[in-house]
Image (cartoon, helix red, strand yellow):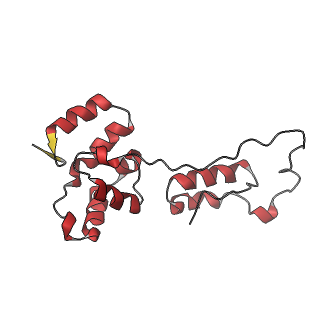
Amino acid sequence: MDTTQDFEPVQAGQQMLALMGAAAQWWAWMPWAAWLPPASQADPAASVEPASVADPAPVAAVAVEDDLTRIEGIGPRIATLLKEAGISGFVALAAARLDQLEAVLAAAGPRFRLAQPASWPQQAALLAAGDEAGFAALAAELKGGVRR
């Protein structure tokens, strides 16, 4: 499903729903969709703007993709696996549960069974918050994602 397609929202709530849905899994926003009226019931006169008003630049839905290889213990292949599983940024990795991360690694095969994801959410939380000094201090204590 491509969430970056052009869309014409019927009301501001649908535009926000579309933007939020592009940044996360679509199923997380489904409860919000029930609150919005269907496009067929919307008032067409309400969505028409005067011709004198210039159309603003189209809003592009941008999913945040961070360099997950900055996390101690994540290499390029594991970063690709995480992105395929929907974890493409530090915020998403910080919110991920340990069992989710272990399931991603287990599904990838025995090659990844040595990876230790226990510290990945903590490292990602520091990077997501912009705490470079805290991240550097934590990374200095880790080797392969495990405390020395």
Image position, residue 77 (x, y; %): 29, 59
* Relative horizontal placement of residue 133, taking residue 113 as reference (left or right): right
* Relative horizontal placement of residue 68, taking residue 61 as reference (left or right): left
Q: In the figure, residue 102 lies in which quadrant?
A: bottom left
- Residue at (66% x, 46% y) in the render: 59
- Residue at (76% x, 62% y) in the render: 39
Closer to the camera, 3 or 15?
Answer: 3
| Marker count (numbered) | 0
Residue with the most extreme front position: 76
Image position, residue 114 (x, y; %): 15, 60
- Residue at (76% x, 55% y) in the render: 10
Q: Assign the N terminus to one quadrant of the image.
A: bottom right
Closer to the camera, 115 or 121?
Answer: 115
120 w.r.t. 35: above or below = above
* Relative horizontal placement of residue 39, taking residue 116 as reference (left or right): right
Residue with the most extreme top position: 133
Image position, residue 42 (x, y; %): 81, 58
Closer to the camera, 109 or 17?
Answer: 109
Q: Can residue 85 be seen in the rendering of this structure?
A: no
Q: Assign the C terminus to one quadrant of the image.
A: top left
Residue with the most extreme left position: 148
Q: Can residue 56 be seen in the rendering of this structure?
A: yes
Q: In the figure, residue 76 lies in which quadrant?
A: bottom left
Image position, residue 18 (x, y; %): 62, 54
